[in-house]
Image: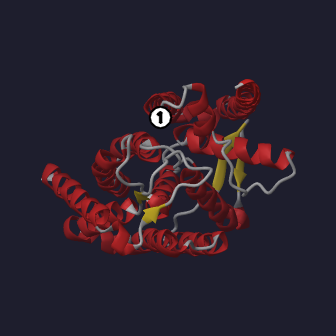
Amino acid sequence: MIILKLIFTFVLSYFFIKLIINNALYLGLTDIPNERSSHTKITPRGAGIGFGFSFFISILIFEFSLFLNYWLVFLSIFMVFLVGILDDHKDATPRAKFYVIFLATFLLFLDDISIYSLGVFLGFDLNLWYFALPFTMFALAGFTNALNLIDGLDGLAGTISLVILSTFLYIGYINDDNLIVTLCLFSMTSILAFLIFNWNPADIFMGDSGSLFLGFVISVIAVISLKYIHPISVFYLTALPILDTVVVMVRRIRKRISPFSPDKTHIHHILLGFFSKKVKTTVIFLILLQCLFSIAGLMMANSSNKLTLGSYSFFAFVAFIFIIALFYMVLTGMKRRQKLIEKLSNRKKRINSKQK
């Protein structure tokens, strides 16, 4: 029966996305390339509208009892999804998106889904007490935005989401958590249909409707999974978007510019230059990188007793900070080298043009 449900979701997602591609101009869902774009032609966007609606329709048809039990969860996801649709059409302000995510997080809090503790480190339980709600708001807003930021290459955000969701699916399955399993399965199936159209060269982009939807769904699943795993495991299970966001924001702050100002210094931009503009190679490398982090996160999740009773969690956290620092140094060095090569290449072109 579950196979038929997933086939229905896949076909519905495929149909909706195909419909959007064929009517993108009429719907006003087109992405015009700019200096930060990795594409050079006008491309349809808003595939997230297609796979998002297929997700909700399938939930209502096949998992209605679950929907009634957790209607606040699905309402919160739908709110973030709607602001993403608005952004695809009329470019919603960052402030508006954050307000909606904060409100959605409050609805989750009413359903007792929140980050109440940062886990046990060196024998001390870092309980958040009254700071649980505001911390959860900023954590969910941060990761939702982080996934949005890595949506810069064909197939990247979709495949990274698949890897992350598959690890949470395993956690939900071994702990018999129907909500986690359902959220993972239906979102993963919807994304698979999208990747048919989004793999390089892409026929359509997911848009903010897709990236905000996926980012928030993963955030919700991660918070629910804290019932079973240590918070430090979540860092590794969702590592790549977090690493990218932290590294980019630190670099911008050091340059004394707004941490929210757009540029082309994300991990995928730098690696794209390293791999000679080969999009598929870059995306596959990043998928494998996230897989390694996910395996590490699952190993920690399966060692949850050690994480809570010993000092393992502290060293795992220190290791993650070290990885962030390492990424920052390596990527900064690669970016400087690429700028130097580009500068020398431009100088050589000018000399050659003068000689002619």
Residue shown at 32% from the left, 51% from the top: 194
Most extreme residue toward the front is 356
x%, y% of residue 149?
A: 59, 51
Q: 275 or 165, which is in the foreground?
A: 275
Q: 275 or 159, which is in the foreground?
A: 275
Asked if residue 87 lies left or right of residue 172, the reply is right
Residue shown at 83% from the left, 54% from the top: 257
- The answer to whether 239 is drawn above or below residue 249 in the figure is above
Q: Residues within 10 Å of mark 1 (few under 14, many from 20)?
A: many
x%, y% of residue 225?
A: 48, 50
Q: Is residue 124 visible?
A: no
x%, y% of residue 255?
A: 85, 46
Q: 75 or 304, which is in the foreground?
A: 75
Asked if residue 158 lies left or right of residue 140, the reply is left
Q: Is residue 159 visible?
A: yes
Q: Can you identify the residue that label 1 sits on?
A: 279
Where's the C terminus, which quadrant? top right
Which scheme is used to colour this image of the protein? secondary structure
Instruction: Tell me which corner region of the image, top left, top right, bottom left or bottom right, holds residue 61.
Output: bottom left
Q: 214 or 221, which is in the foreground?
A: 214
State the count of labels.
1
- The answer to whether 255 is drawn above or below residue 122 in the figure is below
Residue shown at 51% from the left, 32% from the top: 286
x%, y% of residue 110?
A: 53, 74
* SS class, disc 1: helix
Amino acid at the residue labelled 1: Val
Asked if residue 286 lies left or right of residue 171, the reply is right
- The answer to whether 342 is drawn above or below residue 117 in the figure is above
